[in-house]
Image (cartoon, rainbow, N blue to C red):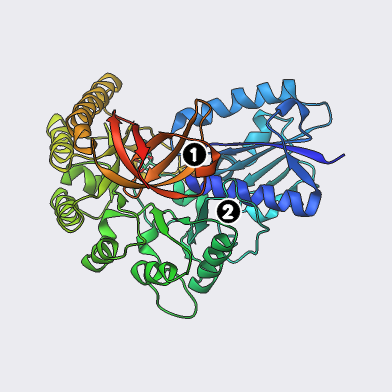
Amino acid sequence: MSKKLFIETLGCAMNVRDSEHMIAELNAHEGYELTDDATAADLILINTCSVREKPVHKLFSELGVFNKLKKSDAKIGVCGCTASHLGKEIIKRAPYVNFVLGARNVSKITDVLHKDRAVEVDIDYDESQFAFKDFRSSPYKAFINISIGCDKQCTFCIVPKTRGEEVSIPPELIVAEVKKAVDNGAKEVFLLGQNVNNYGRRLANEKVNFTELLRRVSAVEGLERIRFTSPHPLHMDDEFIEEFARNPKICKSMHMPLQSGSTNILKAMKRGYSKEWFLNRAQKLRELVPDVSISTDIIVAFPGESDEDFEDTMDVLNQVRFEQLFSFKYSPRPLTEAEKMEEVDSEVGSDRLDRLQARHDEILDEMKSINLGKMVEVYFEELRSDGYVAGRSDNNLSIKVKGSEEWLGKIAKVKIIEVSRNVQYGEIIA
Ligand code: 5AD
Ligand code: SF4
């Protein structure tokens, strides 16, 4: 009988891809098969996120639960960003954990498995060119790493300390991965990096920036859609926005992580751009791509944020009218510059978060009727239990239509017949 692997993945899309790599390596070299039943597993992995404090607290209570329910000889491994920054402390606090594997040490998964209490968390380790075995959780959409690590020093962010410095994966390896995914049936690729439009860092052979990489990837025959995350507003130069607008394979959905609308706070965050620069970039995008949908990340109550600073953030929200908002109350993180700064009162932070989200809901309600009756192209990826198939439009609207698995992996023209804040219903036209 094969050995069983249970894996829980928290955090961002990079973690999802790291989990796929671990699943592939464990399957190819150790014969593990996936299970969604932790009590039946021989190996339990938690791929953690450390971007905010809460999930880190949750980790230890979750580990306790897994330790109780697991088979007596099953192993537990903690992987990902929290593994990187807590390292051996995890085994101190939870001695039944068998190994700790950092976010930049994914390729060592089959080594740590056989070492008692191994801790591999070196953030200088370079596995950017490691030839991982193949596994993808979706046949329709392929996550493709284009770089590892991050060279920015945003003062709130722990990621440079968990994923190390930025190294770009050579363009020919990326294009080969894209071709392989397309040969295996994917029509869409999702290019991944902490800071994708800073692409080109530490490439040995040639100078290729992100815009050029997009051109090369889009030349792959049979590929229909390109998405990417996350770009940085600072690196959104004209050439990049123009390529985004002009290239028909690039999906018209852009993530622009604002973080704050106040130029003073952006300075304290070391984001490298001002409120005006951000507004100017968003305006250029809306001008060149009228259908674009813009999503953003916002942190409220960063240390030192005054009422006036927060009003600047509300002002940007009102001007850009983001189609999607991910918003967070500032959470102090170890190893960051902002950790030592004086915090904003917690209740003030909660009120600001409520106000921001309530205003964004109003904006969504004002905007949703614009989509009613629109024709969009939808790539169907998911079968829902209620007789619907679901997918996304080019500009990232989530769309459901009545239908069965025959639509999976197909792109169809859909007319939107019902709209709400987060999902639209449609009917297939062709
Ligand atoms: N506190 C709150 N939110 C944070 N993020 C990153 N670090 C923190 C922090 N210390 C948010 C940012 C980032 C998203 C992935 O998480 O908005 O873009
Ligand atoms: Fe992803 Fe950042 Fe969380 Fe690490 S800390 S899993 S890079 S979101």
Instruction: Report if residue 342 is visible in the image.
Output: no
Query: Looking at the picture, how far across and down is residue 241, in whole percent?
Result: 25, 62
> At label 2, which amino acid type do we have?
Arg
Q: Residues within 10 Å of mark 1 (few under 14, many from 20)?
A: some
Q: Assign a secondary structure to mark 1.
A: loop
> At label 1, which amino acid type do we have?
Gly
Query: Looking at the picture, how far across and down is residue 118, in whole percent?
Result: 73, 45
Which residue is farthest front?
A: 430
Query: Looking at the picture, how far across and down is residue 145, in whole percent?
Result: 51, 58
Residue 105 versus residue 208: which sits nearer the camera? 208
Q: From the viewer's perspective, is 218 left or right of 68?
A: left
* Mark 1, residue position: 11
Per the model, the C-alpha gap separating discs 1 and 2 is 15 Å
Dividing the image into four quarters, tell me where ligand 1 lies: top left
Q: Is disc 1's CB within 8 Å of ligand 2?
A: yes
Residue 395 versus residue 157: which sits nearer the camera? 395
In the picture shown, does residue 65 fall above or below 331? above
* Mark 2, residue position: 104
Which residue is farthest bottom?
A: 205
Q: From the viewer's perspective, is 125 left or right of 12?
A: right
In the picture shown, does residue 242 fall above or below 301? below
In the picture shown, does residue 84 fall above or below 400? below
Which image quadrant for residue 68?
A: top right
